[in-house]
Amino acid sequence: MNPLPHVVLELAAYALGARLYWAAREPARGAMPLADQLAILAGAICGAALGSKLLYVAQYASALASQPWTAWLSGKTVAGGLLGGWAGVELAKRAVGWKASTGDRFVVPFAVALVIGRLGCQLSGAWDLTYGTPTDLPWGWDYGDGVPRHPVAGYEALALIAFLVWHRARPATGHPGERFRVFVASYLAMRVVLEFLKPPFGPAIGDVIVADRHAGLTAIQWVCLAGFAVCLASLRRTRVVPAILPRH
């Protein structure tokens, strides 16, 4: 298992995502004081770091209980980082008194960065815990145990590319924050489904740690369902949900 592709592509994802975000926020730079921008950015970074770690621990709590403390700090989850970063931004905005939505400018940078990062996951083997359960489909991926498995990280990258195409083609509704909430809701719903294609919903690889299940679902699935409900309620309040449904 070679972690090098994961490390290289993850660093590339951070760099490109940051560059795209910086470019997207330039028109609004004069409207928000620099100190407030930095506070919101700090909120996003701290919230994402905390959320990604906490959800990782909740996801693998039983397996981590017998591991050294370094194992508790080594992992992270994108879903936890996304929701933690969102919470961090909202807390920072409240602290500085900024009421306008800032989420839409995160959508493209985050989605592009995540596509690149997931390609790194797909090429890295089983150690980053994104591998799938066995499959007979012709595109089954061998993660090192000789068994074709669902390339779950690849599925996620393709779904994100499809979202970016939709995002590019669909005109904005005029509701600030709408595209961010649609993105978050779409991503969380996708994660709930894709988690069913990973252990513990099928055989794991060797001694790689496996997620716990709580009332049939993993911690990531429960958190994603809760986040999806929050997004849907927010979209309904702004009457956006009917606008994004297919027209008959």
Image (tube, rainbow, N blue to C red):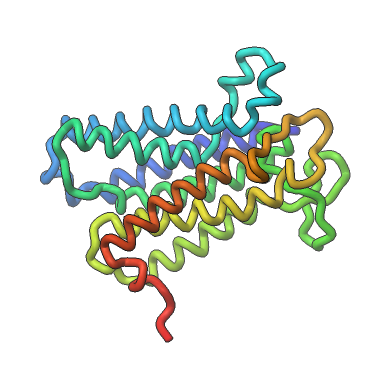
| Left or right: residue 142 compared with residue 161 | right
Q: Locate residue 21, reporting x and y percent.
A: 33, 46
**Most distant residue in the right direction:** 146
Q: Locate residue 110, reporting x and y percent.
A: 42, 47
- The residue closer to the viewer here, 45 or 243, is 243
Which quadrant of the view contains residue 66?
Answer: top right
Say if 106 sits above or below 172 in the image: above
Q: Locate residue 41, reporting x and y percent.
A: 29, 34
Residue for point 43% across, 78% down = 246
Residue for point 83% across, 51% down = 148
- The residue closer to the viewer here, 27 or 46, is 46
| Left or right: residue 71 compared with residue 162 | right
**Most distant residue in the front direction:** 215
Residue for point 71% across, 51% down = 197
**Most distant residue in the bottom direction:** 248
Say if 181 sits above or below 127 in the image: below
Which quadrant of the view contains residue 31?
Answer: top left
- The residue closer to the viewer here, 232 or 169, is 232
Residue for point 67% across, 38% down = 213
The C terminus - image quarter = bottom left
The N terminus - image quarter = top right
Q: Locate residue 137, reporting x and y percent.
A: 80, 62
